[in-house]
Image: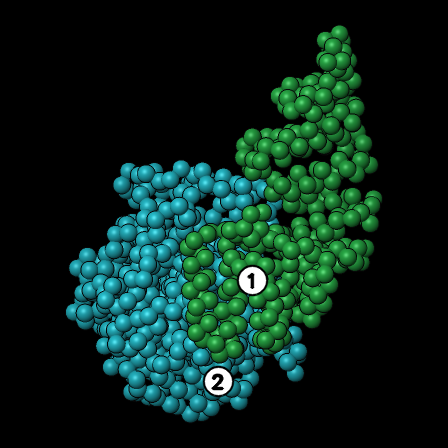
């Protein structure tokens, strides 16, 4: 009420507009809030904090909307947020939080190289920032640059040895590059640090590592542990079938392949790489 | 020793794009630049055909069309046949040969279907397919209608083989999707959040066809009876190869966004689909991929043909190693081929020993289907470079990024690719059809002359005249290599029907063994390298020197 009165009294006061916008945002009155936050920016364009608040408001709104980042409405919010964040950084290049926000927004909109550039700038200022090297590792990985991804994940682990997720991602790449023993070491460390939803992937990758090393029994044990945590992903079921076949258990192999086909026809998310990566077990309440 | 050999190989391989100086005046057209519809992104077949039987491979390029003309029911663009002038250049003989085609074209396959000694030409179209019978006088006649092979649907690739062993070549044809250009789906589908053309998912897949050659110029559709009508699929690539070494051709089909098929030939005119059971339907995680092109080859020289399948971007092309017991294993990452292919949308491919070191390498032609990806940074671009992977001889491959420095490195949207030693100098060259562009002719300017080779042209007598399905094995000091004469593979493509072997330092082949589709086996000992040979089934190995126009 006070904030509204202040704006009514002096609409040209940027601080009043900003305050009122923030209050409206907290009350969930988004359209009104955006109007006043924009007004504040317009009245005081050199105030980095106002640009930053507008950007955060827009990003929060996008996130709360539940819309996919590529829905035109969500996209508009994110593009506006990016413009605001760029303003912040023009006025205040050392604002690390704004740069991190900008990087995340670029990433969400498929501008991976721009995101990497922003993260790299942050890394130059705050090389020990938690999760930073992890994020860069994920981006390098998405851009098919495993060498840089490995370097980033390793940096993250050097700084934060208990970062189990970084070990998991690193292990997957090492496995692909044939560094099976190293991958196994990281997976065994990750096993103790990860929560249940992602543990299925640890066991799945461990099973792959054992298979590549020719240790079929250990591989079978690991893949079964993965399936205990989530029985409805296709990948571990398919791996189980391969292992049965390779150990001469042809009937179980056949039955497991039938199960793979059943899963495929019943629930398309059972083959969803994103769900698999993030541990969203199909058919289970998240 | 291996490392020295490797260093020599790495530095030796080099291709130069000579399409323009060679006179390949051709431009591929495939609708509009925005690529709003699936039909505009898939075509671009290519085939090497020695249509005049002079020992110099000629080149056939399939063209697409203009969208507006398609709607108006006309087509002013043309496929093209280029005659090899035997001096490194080609002449366009399309008009005289009458092989321009009348429909929006896709793939091409070569075989002498009527056993008259002249190779014929099958062309897959969006619309009725064409079957150009070679009249032996430089002209062709379209016999699709009278032969019963003019399938009117959206055909992609075709491949010939004598699956029933009667001496007449049969034909497998992949059909892609049910599509009506007059009512195409609006381009409102999403790819990584980007609005793009729709399909194939969301559209209805179409059924493939197996035509049995009746031996009288006609074919019969035996798809159902032969057991290859398992389910409709988004069929794109196809290759016949003897998967289980039992002497008859099996069939592998790459399906877009669905499991791939492996049809085992029972030898009684029927097949069984065993893709899932044999582990060649999906990737190593049981995931469906977007199969495009296919290649079969014994890259590890263990006496079993392996498979390579090209796929969409954000995924890898898959190398399936044939374990020899009815099963395959996805060894892509172990072979060093995983990450390198991830950003690329791949089409044509093939195993071939480009550097004559006795190990079959891999070539892949790439190009995205969505121009819209260039507006983002997702690690892929619309125009992409092609890739050459050198076989290191230890189960691994290494991409040689400088292999195309001679002009072939320019990013394009490539589609079909096919191999032939078009200049008869003992190494294999590559023809590529590029979407909306001029073709590439990558002349192989390596390896060093110190490496030996052998090229063999085969002619069946009891077997089909093109000798398709014939297995040739050569044995040198270092071991064995094998090839099969293939009637179509890669993506919408056909390689030269001659078989090529690199022999490295071996100046002679200790044993050359030919297993004909008829079952007859011929053996030749102490065969001198660095020559072209001709072999008629049951006859003697004849050195052949092709006349050159210098």
The hue used for chain B is cyan
Residue A18 horizontal side relative to residue A109, left or right: right
Say which residue appears at 50% left-offset and 54% top-offset: A270
Between residue B33 and residue A221, name the one nearer to us.
A221
Query: Which corner quadrant of the image does residue B536 belong to?
Result: bottom left
Say which residue appears at 38% left-offset and 76% top-offset: B242
Q: Nearer the viewer, mark 1 or mark 2?
A: 1
- Residue A165 in view here: yes
Q: Position of residue B318 (x, y in %)?
A: 51, 64
Query: Which corner quadrant of the image does residue B256 belong to?
Result: bottom left
The hue used for chain A is green
Say which residue appears at 49% left-offset and 42% top-offset: B190
Between residue B170 and residue A1, name the one nearer to us.
A1
**Residue wearing tag 1:** A227
Q: Position of residue A232 (x, y in %)?
A: 51, 57
Residue A99 horizontal side relative to residue B419, left or right: right
Residues flagged by tags 1 and 2 on a common chain: no
The residue tagged with tag 2: helix, strand or loop?
strand
- Determine whether A66 is above or below B146 in the image: above
**Residue wearing tag 2:** B480
Say which residue appears at 70% left-offset and 37% top-offset: A102
- Determine whether A64 is above or below B534 in the image: above
Q: Which of the image's four quarters has the N terminus of chain A?
A: top right
The residue tagged with tag 1: helix, strand or loop?
helix
Chain for mark 2? Answer: B
User: Across the whole image, how many numbered discs are drawn on residues?
Assistant: 2
Residue B21, disc: none
């Amino acid at each position: 009420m006070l904030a509204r009165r202040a704006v009514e009294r002096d609409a040209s006061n940027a601080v009043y507009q900003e305050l009122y916008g923030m209050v409206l945002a907290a009350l969930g009155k988004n359209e009104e809030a955006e109007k006043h936050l924009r007004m504040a920016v317009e009245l005081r364009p050199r105030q980095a904090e106002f640009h930053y608040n507008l950007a955060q408001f827009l990003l929060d709104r996008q996130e709360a909307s539940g819309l996919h980042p590529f829905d035109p409405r969500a996209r508009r919010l994110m593009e506006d947020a990016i413009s605001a964040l760029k303003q912040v950084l023009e006025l205040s290049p050392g604002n690390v939080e704004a740069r991190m926000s900008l990087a995340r927004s670029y990433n969400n909109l498929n501008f991976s190289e721009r995101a990497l550039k922003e993260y790299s700038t942050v890394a130059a200022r705050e090389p020990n920032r938690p999760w930073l090297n992890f994020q860069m590792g994920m981006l390098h990985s998405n851009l098919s640059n495993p060498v840089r991804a490995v370097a980033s994940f390793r940096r993250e682990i050097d700084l934060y040895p208990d970062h189990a997720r970084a070990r998991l991602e690193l292990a997957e790449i090492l496995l692909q590059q044939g560094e099976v023993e190293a991958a196994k070491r990281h997976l065994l460390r990750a096993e103790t640090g990860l929560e249940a939803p992602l543990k299925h992937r640890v066991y799945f990758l461990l099973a792959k590592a054992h298979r590549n090393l020719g240790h079929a029994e250990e591989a079978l044990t690991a893949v079964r542990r993965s399936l205990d945590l989530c029985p409805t992903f296709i990948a571990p079921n398919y791996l189980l079938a391969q292992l049965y076949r390779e150990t001469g258990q042809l009937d179980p192999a056949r039955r497991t392949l039938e199960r793979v086909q059943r899963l495929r026809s019943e629930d398309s998310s059972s083959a969803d790489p994103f769900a698999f990566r993030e541990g969203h077990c199909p058919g289970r309440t998240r | 020793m291996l490392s020295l050999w490797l260093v020599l190989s790495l530095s030796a391989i080099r291709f130069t794009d000579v399409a323009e100086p060679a006179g390949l005046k051709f431009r591929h057209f495939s609708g509009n630049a925005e690529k709003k519809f699936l039909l505009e992104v898939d075509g671009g077949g290519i085939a090497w055909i020695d249509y005049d039987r002079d020992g110099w491979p000629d080149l056939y390029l399939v063209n697409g069309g203009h969208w507006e003309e398609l709607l108006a029911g006309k087509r002013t663009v043309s496929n093209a046949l280029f005659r090899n002038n035997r001096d490194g250049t080609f002449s366009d003989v399309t008009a005289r040969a009458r092989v321009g085609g009348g429909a929006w074209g896709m793939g091409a396959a070569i075989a002498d279907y009527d056993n008259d000694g002249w190779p014929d030409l099958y062309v897959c179209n969006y619309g009725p397919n064409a079957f150009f019978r070679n009249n032996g006088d430089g002209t062709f006649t379209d016999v699709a209608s009278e032969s019963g092979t003019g399938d009117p649907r959206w055909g992609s690739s075709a491949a010939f083989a004598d699956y029933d062993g009667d001496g007449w070549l049969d034909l497998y044809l992949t059909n892609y999707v049910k599509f009506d250009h007059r009512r195409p789906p609006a381009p409102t589908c999403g790819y990584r959040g980007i609005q793009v053309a729709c399909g194939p998912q969301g559209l209805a897949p179409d059924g493939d066809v197996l035509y049995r050659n009746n031996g009288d110029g006609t074919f019969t559709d035996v798809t159902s009876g032969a057991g290859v009508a398992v389910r409709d699929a988004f069929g794109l690539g196809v290759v016949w190869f003897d998967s289980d070494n039992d002497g008859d051709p099996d069939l592998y089909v790459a399906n877009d966004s669905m499991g791939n098929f492996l049809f085992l030939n029972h030898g009684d005119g029927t097949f069984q689909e065993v893709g899932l059971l044999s582990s060649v339907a999906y990737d190593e995680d049981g995931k469906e991929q977007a199969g495009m092109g296919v290649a079969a080859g014994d890259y590890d020289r263990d006496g079993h043909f392996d498979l390579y399948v090209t796929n969409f971007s954000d995924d890898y092309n898959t190398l399936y190693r044939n374990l020899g017991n009815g099963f395959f294993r996805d060894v892509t990452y172990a072979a060093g081929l995983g990450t390198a292919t991830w950003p690329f949308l791949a089409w044509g491919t093939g195993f071939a020993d480009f550097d004559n070191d006795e190990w079959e390498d891999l070539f892949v032609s790439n190009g995205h289907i969505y121009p819209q990806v260039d507006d983002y940074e997702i690690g892929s671009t619309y125009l992409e470079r092609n890739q050459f992977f050198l076989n290191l001889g230890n189960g691994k491959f290494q991409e040689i990024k400088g292999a195309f420095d001679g002009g072939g490195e320019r990013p394009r949207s490539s589609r079909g690719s096919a191999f032939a030693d078009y200049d008869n100098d003992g190494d294999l060259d590559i023809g590529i059809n590029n979407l909306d562009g001029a073709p590439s002719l990558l002349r192989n300017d390596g390896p060093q002359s110190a490496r030996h080779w052998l090229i063999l042209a085969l002619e069946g007598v009891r077997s089909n005249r093109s000798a398709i399905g014939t297995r040739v094995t050569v044995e040198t000091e270092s071991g064995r290599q094998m090839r099969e004469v293939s009637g179509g593979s890669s993506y919408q493509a056909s390689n030269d029907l001659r078989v090529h072997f690199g022999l490295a330092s071996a100046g002679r082949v200790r044993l050359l063994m030919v297993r004909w589709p008829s079952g007859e086996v011929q053996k030749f000992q102490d065969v001198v390298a660095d020559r072209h040979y001709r072999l008629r089934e049951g006859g003697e190995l004849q050195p052949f020197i092709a006349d050159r126009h210098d």
